[in-house]
Image: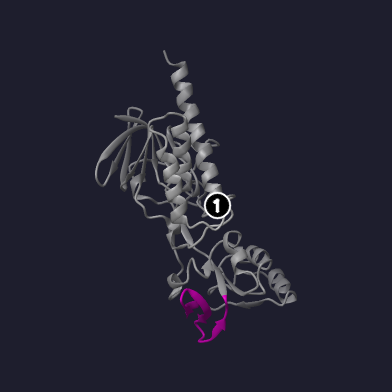
Amino acid sequence: MVYEAIIIGGGPAGLSAALNFGRGMRHTLVIDDHNPRNQVTDESHGYLTQDSISPSLFRQRAANDVKKYDAVEQIHDRVIDIMKQDQLFYVTTQNSSYTAQQVLIATGLRESLPTIDNIENFYGKSVFYCPWCDGYEMRNKTLAIINPTQAIMHLAKIVTNFAKEIILFTDGTDILDQADKQLLKKKQISIYYQKVLGMKGQHGEVTALQLDNGIEIPIEGAFTYVHWDTDFGFLQSLQVEREESGKLKVDSLGQTNIPGLFVAGESKENFAGQLIDAAANGGMTAKMMMMQQFEKEFTSD
């Protein structure tokens, strides 16, 4: 069987795309390994009608929505390779192989936390990366901002809106210029340039940061930097072009340099965003993919 589309990833982008393919009556296969990046998160926010929903419940409801459409199949498996030959994609998983006219990468991102002791015990509970996602829940607290890049100033401007007090930690760098330092001094915002070695607290609630000069700084929560990439092993057989930043290069439709290979959601943006943004992009990309199919079918002899 040749599917009209295979979607790799069953998160908000992938399932939104699947929903649209189902409504477009396109034979589609969703392959997901049930290992989402946001599984450490208790609640997701900012999605109209779904505010405060747990990511696991969101995925369950989304998968149930897709099940209503007979044209779409969903399987639990892991993609290990993709090849293209004679206008078709050959997708190999750990358990089987499949063929499709188009492939949508909606796998999200590979995420790695900074090398700070115990951070994994607090990440997703009292330590986050996105103030738009979790700033409201951390309101009126003393919050750390941990970031070794110039983005720390951008975050300071946002997190100040929510926090009782913010404290900046550049994690071993001196990235701030004099103008930034003067502005922070004027705002009476403390800055620590030492490396952050560890976090202390209990039951998911961080209470202090441990610095490499031996001191501890009391806090009630934190926003930290996180490393993301889309260096998925299953793309190695394809010569997919990337931007200098490592981001997958796509056109305005979400298509890569390989015709028929599309990217949506966080995989496309190379940045972890909110569920509603990924879902919206997945749905739009699916429509663009179907229009490509319809054009080909309509104009063929």
Give the residue at mark 1. Answer: 50
Magenta includes 209? yes
> Helix, strand or loop at disc 1?
loop
Where residue 278 appears, as percent x and y from the top left, is: 52, 47
Q: Nearer the viewer, residue 218 or 269?
A: 218
| Residue 292 in sight in this render | yes
Query: At 67% across and 74% down in the image, what residue appears?
Result: 164
Image vertical order of residue 12 relative to residue 174, above or below: above
| Label tally | 1
Q: Residue furthest left?
A: 95
Label the magenta part by its dominant secondary structure: strand
Report whether 46 appears left or right of 105.
right
Magenta span includes 141: no
Residue 150 seen by the camera: no
Q: Is residue 98 left or right of residue 206?
A: left
Q: Quadrant of the C terminus?
A: top left
Residue 200 location (% of width, % of height)? 48, 80
* Residue drawn at the location 50% of the way across and 81% of the way down: 210
- Vertical placement of residue 28 versus 185, above or below: above
Q: Residue 252: give x, y in percent of width and height.
A: 55, 36
Residue occupying the point 34% across, 50% down: 33
> Which amino acid, mark 1?
Gln
**Quadrant including the N terminus:** top left
What is the magenta range? 196-220
* Image spot of residue 145 (x, y percent): 59, 70
